[in-house]
Structure formats: structure tokens, C-alpha cells
Image: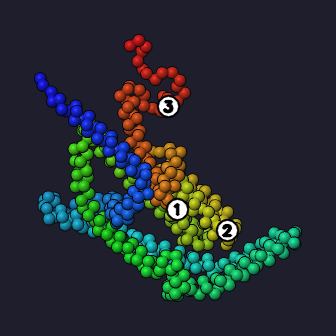
Amino acid sequence: MGHDRRNPYLAAGLTAFAVIAGSLLLFFLLFHFRTVASYLGTIARILRPIFMGAVIAFLLVPVHRWISGLLRDVVPERWRAVRWVKRVTGFLAILLSLLLACLLIYVLLAMVIPQVWQSIVDLVMAVPDYIVGIQNWLRTFLDDNPDIQAAVLSVYSSAAASLEQWLNSDILPNLESVTATLNWLRSDILPNITGVVTGVSAIFLGLFNLIKDLVIAIIVSAYLLARKDVLAAQSKKIVYSILPTRGADLIVNEARSGYRIMSGFITGSLLVSLIIGVVCFVFCSLFQFPYPALIATIIGVTNVIPFFGPFIGAVPSLFLIFIVNPIQSIYFAIFLLVMQQLDGNILTPKVLGGSTGLDSFWVLFSIILFGGLFGFAGMVLGVPVFAMVYSVISRLVRRGLRQRALPEETGEYMGRTGPMSREKPGE
């Protein structure tokens, strides 16, 4: 039976071409890295509304599915297969999902922003009293050293007088109302910033671009919610057309697992942070801690960051309470310790469960790595992204061990010094 002799030569030629092309591409990337990074940054800025819309759609998928189920139950069974009924219910599900998200954001902002604003105004207005209190504390602390007391109080009094004059003459009058604040920002602050941001027009242009991107992102999210099943099917079709069936099955299963990890972690983290913020606000209000809304907002927002979040939020919160009442700062520190123990041992395991499956060391590793690369977003998303990678590697390792008839449990390899093969010698 004859064979086509051109096939080996064709395969060798394509392999050589791929190797040469890959080498040239690698050489170009190494020696023109800044140019490539600049082009990638430009593409990322252009596609920013698409990315924002994808994030919005990702967060709204559970809400959209819940509303779709409710609408499907309302529609009589004999009408569910009608095309125009499907389109109407799909449109209503997307519209209600977006309206529900906007309503939730509006309610949260309407509850938080006035309280936070009032807390900031009260904090600024109370600075003179804090200055006097610190001055009295310094005088009492340095009573046994009059020379040091005179030197320290002289410098402190001069700095405090300058700060108090600046607050009374420039800051406090402009915080009496929202109108006065806006006039102050427009007349005094913005003209002084023009040298840094190259004109007030750049600020308004940036604000306009942000609003434009948000509008486009909402439209994109609506399209993605409407076409999510079709896009998922098209992606699967592409994967199965390129890879062997077993490899495609592996990719599809890992994609589903990654989605479950990411969605479960993000929604669970947001829910836990909201609960922590509400509990903190209630506690601070009941025990009359200063600036309850501001402190609860700081604690709730920073709690989104795994591992480091509670510590990041505790430092400014304790400082704000300390300058008002040092004794209350001790009570608040005890409250934070108790709340974090309840959060780490009860609340987070109940809400998140085993959504990541990562050991504490890998959580710390992922936060440090992705936080250093991508900042705050990396600290928030680093854990689920690394959990997805960790899950893929774990599945591949277990598959390889099964093929070699080796144990999959980690405990089997602890303290083991002999050969791992289960085959008998001489076989």
C-alpha cells in the first residue's frame, strides 16, 4: 500500500517554519518590549468599555438567571416555546437585572455618602479640639523634663497655630454646604491643579470619557447577557475544532471550574464585606464610636482584600478613634479581633465554602504577586485567578499519577524515601 512521501517533508518544513517564526517573534518582543507594551496599552484603553461590560455581565449572571427563572414560571407552559415570548422575557430579564443593580448601587450610595460626608466634615471641624488635647497630653507627659517640654511645645504650638488658621480660614467655610464646596473646588482648587493635569478641560474630558465608557459598558453587558449561551457554544465549537476530543473536554471542564471559582469567590467576598460593614456600623452606632459611617465604610471596603484587608482597614479606623478617645480605640481593636475571628472561622467558610481550595500560604503568595503587578485589582482578583491555575495544575498532576498507577494523596509522599513504583522488582 503506497504512502505519500511528501507528508514527512511537509511536516518537517512546517515545523522548521514554526520554530523560525517563533524565534523571530521572541527576538522582536525582547528587543522592542516597550513598543509592544505601548501598543498593548493602547489596545487595552480602546477595549476598556468591553472589559468593563464583561465584568458587569459576569456579576449580573446569577441575578439574570434568577429573574429569567421567575419570568419563565410566570409564562404559561404552552407559550414558553414561542419565539417572540422568549425574546420578550429575555429582554425583560436583562432590563430588570440592570435596573436592580442600579437600584442597589443607588440605595447603598444614598445611605453611605451623606454619612461619610458628615463624618469627614465633623472630623475636620474637630481638629482644633484634637490639637488642644494633644498639647495638654504633651505638657502632662513632659512635666518632669521642662527643657524638653518647652522645646517640644514651642514647635508644636507654632505648627498647630498654622494648621488651625488654615482650617478656619480656608477649609471650614468651604465645607458648610455642598454648594459652597463646589464653588470652592471650582474657584480655588481646580485652577491650582491645572499645572499638574494640563488644564481643567482635561479633568472634564476624563470625566466625559469615564461616563461614555460606563454607558458603553452597560450596553455591552446587555449584549453579553443576551448572547451568553451562544457565545459559550461558539467557544466550545472552536475548542473542539482545534484540539482532540479528550483535550477539548479537559479545557471545557477547566473553564467551567474556573467560572465557578471566580463567581463564587467574587459574589461571596462582596456579600461578606457588606455584612462586615453593616455589623461594624451597627456596633459603632450602638456604642457611640466617632464617625461610625466612615469607619464602617473603610472596614467593609478593605475587607474585600483577602488576608491583608482587615489590617489595612484597621489602621486608619483605629487612628480616627484614637484621636477622639484613646480608650475607645482599645475597645474597637478588641471588637475587630473578635469580628475577624468570627469572619474567618464562621462567616467566610459558610458563605465562600471551598470556592478556592487554596492553602493559606498560596493565598498570601497570590495576593503579594498579583497585588505587586496590578495594584488593588490584583489584590482582590489574585486569589480566584491563582485558584483557577492551581486547580488546572492539580487536575493535570492527578491525571498523570493515575496513568502511572501512583497514589494521588499528598500524605503518601510525606516522609517517603523509597521508590514510589508499585511494581515488584524483576517484573
The tally of labels here is: 3
Residue at the spot of label 2:
322
Residue 130 spot, x, y in % from top left: 69, 76
Viewport quadrant of the N terminus: top left
Q: Amino acid at mark 3?
A: Gly
Residue 169 spot, x, y in % from top left: 63, 87
Whether residue 301 sits left or right of residue 170 in the image: it is: left
Which of these two is toward me, 334 or 355? 355
Q: Secondary structure at mark 1?
A: helix
**To which quarter of the image does residue 219 belong?**
bottom left
Q: Amino acid at mark 2?
A: Phe
**Mark 3 and mark 1 residues within 8 Å of each other at the beta carbon:** no
Between discs 1 and 2, the one toward the N terminus = 1
Residue 271 spot, x, y in % from top left: 44, 60
Above or below for 262 versus 82: above
CA neighbours of label 3 inside 10 A, class few (<14), some (14 to 19), many (20+): few
Label 3 to label 1, Cα distance in Å? 36 Å
**Mark 3 and mark 2 residues within 8 Å of each other at the beta carbon:** no
CA neighbours of label 2 inside 10 A, class few (<14), some (14 to 19), many (20+): some
Residue at the spot of label 1:
302
CA neighbours of label 1 inside 10 A, class few (<14), some (14 to 19), many (20+): many
Label 3 to label 2, Cα distance in Å? 49 Å
Q: Secondary structure at mark 2?
A: helix
Residue 177 shows in the view = no
Residue 128 spot, x, y in % from top left: 69, 80
Q: Amino acid at mark 1?
A: Thr
Residue at the spot of label 3:
411
Between discs 3 and 2, the one toward the N terminus = 2
Which of these two is toward me, 258 or 207? 207
| Residue pictured at 39% horizontal, 50% vertical | 28
Above or below for 249 versus 201: above
**To which quarter of the image does residue 415 belong?**
top right
